[in-house]
Image (cartoon, rainbow, N blue to C red):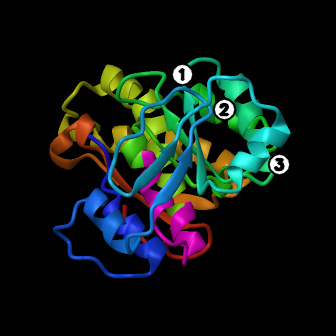
């Protein structure tokens, strides 16, 4: 299950959306028809409405050749498929060169790699500067398609995405299920919520120093189901603008 991007897109663009719109419809509406020009240095397939894809070129490119190419690019999409430390170094290099980056985490099916977040936290990268992060190309690029009119709302989306995909789905969900089962007994709910909040909160503290200053506002397991976990975030020392 992927979290609903639509409220984050609406808040970032500071425009209301009909509640029935899905995330792709929302992004296409909010972009006002302006195509997003995406460059992929790795061999990735990018096929979706509203995208102009500039795929990796077959011959090696010098930094100067690539800089000339990137003059016509809206966002560079990098995929995590192998070594998280190497990818973090690539992210660091490109951000320092002033490129706008989005990351798609493809290493594990349906969940993020917590080692990627650890590698980024060990670098000088401010993850709050990323254009997007998610587990599919479409989910990653949708936030990059829309006009950025509220940077705090965009950072809220990034914090939520890292926490849900990389930390919860990547690690904590399995820990909670091993301890409490797929359905948490009512008399164990307080302990399960406390453990989940503690584990997720520990990563949020580290994200604070990398440009995402948010704390957990609420966390729940609807009907006791671990897989149905929901949470909301609030900006550190102030109320959150978007409910996740």
Q: Is residue 14 left or right of residue 60?
A: left
Query: Where residue 222 appears, x then y in whole percent?
Result: 20, 48
Q: Is residue 62 left or right of residue 189?
A: right
Residue under the point 33% across and 65% down: 28
Of labels 2 and 3, earlier in sequence is: 3
Choose top left, top right, bottom left or bottom right for residue 90: top right
How far apart marks 2 and 3 lie (CA) works out to 19 Å
Query: Where residue 56 appears, x then y in whole percent?
Result: 59, 31
Residue under the point 46% across and 76% down: 13
User: Alpha-carbon neighbours of circle 2 within 10 Å: few (<14), some, or many (≥20)?
Assistant: some
Of labels 2 and 1, earlier in sequence is: 1
Is 145 inside the magenta-drawn segment? yes
Residue under the point 48% across and 45% down: 53
Task: Identify the residue position indicated by label 2 in the image.
Answer: 118
Of labels 1 and 3, earlier in sequence is: 1
Helix, strand or loop for the magenta stretch, by majority: helix
Q: Which residues are magenta?
A: 140-155
**The C terminus sits in image quarter:** bottom left
User: Alpha-carbon neighbours of circle 1 within 10 Å: few (<14), some, or many (≥20)?
Assistant: few
CB under 8 Å between callouts 2 and 3? Answer: no
> Foreground: 223 or 233?
233
**The N terminus sits in image quarter:** top left
Question: In the figure, 30 relative to 213: above or below?
Answer: below
Query: Where residue 154 appears, x then y in whole percent?
Result: 53, 65
> Foreground: 97 or 13?
97
Is 82 inside the magenta-drawn segment? no
CB under 8 Å between callouts 2 and 1? Answer: no
Task: Identify the residue position indicated by label 1 in the image.
Answer: 81
User: Alpha-carbon neighbours of circle 3 within 10 Å: few (<14), some, or many (≥20)?
Assistant: few
Task: Identify the residue position indicated by label 3 in the image.
Answer: 96
């Amino acid at each position: 299950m992927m979290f609903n991007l639509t409220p984050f897109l609406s808040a970032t663009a500071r425009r209301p959306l009909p509640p029935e719109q899905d995330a792709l419809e929302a992004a296409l509406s909010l972009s006002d028809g302006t195509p997003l020009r995406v460059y992929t240095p790795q061999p990735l397939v990018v096929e979706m409405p509203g995208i102009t894809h500039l795929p990796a070129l077959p011959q090696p490119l010098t930094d100067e050749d690539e800089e000339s190419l990137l003059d016509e690019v809206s966002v560079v999409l990098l995929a995590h498929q192998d070594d998280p430390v190497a990818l973090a170094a690539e992210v660091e290099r490109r951000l320092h060169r002033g490129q706008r980056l989005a990351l798609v985490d493809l290493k594990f099916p349906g969940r993020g790699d917590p080692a990627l977040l650890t590698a980024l936290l060990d670098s000088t990268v401010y993850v709050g500067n990323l254009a997007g992060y998610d587990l599919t190309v479409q989910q990653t690029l949708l936030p990059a398609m829309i006009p950025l009119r509220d940077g705090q709302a965009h950072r809220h989306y990034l914090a939520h995405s890292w926490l849900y995909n990389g930390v919860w789905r990547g690690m904590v969900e399995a820990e909670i299920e091993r301890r409490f089962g797929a359905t948490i007994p009512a008399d164990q709910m307080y302990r399960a919520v406390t453990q989940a909040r503690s584990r997720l909160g520990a990563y949020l503290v580290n994200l604070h120093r990398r440009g995402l200053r948010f704390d957990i506002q609420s966390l729940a397991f609807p009907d006791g189901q671990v897989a149905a976990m929901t949470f909301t975030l609030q900006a550190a020392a102030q109320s959150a603008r978007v409910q996740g």
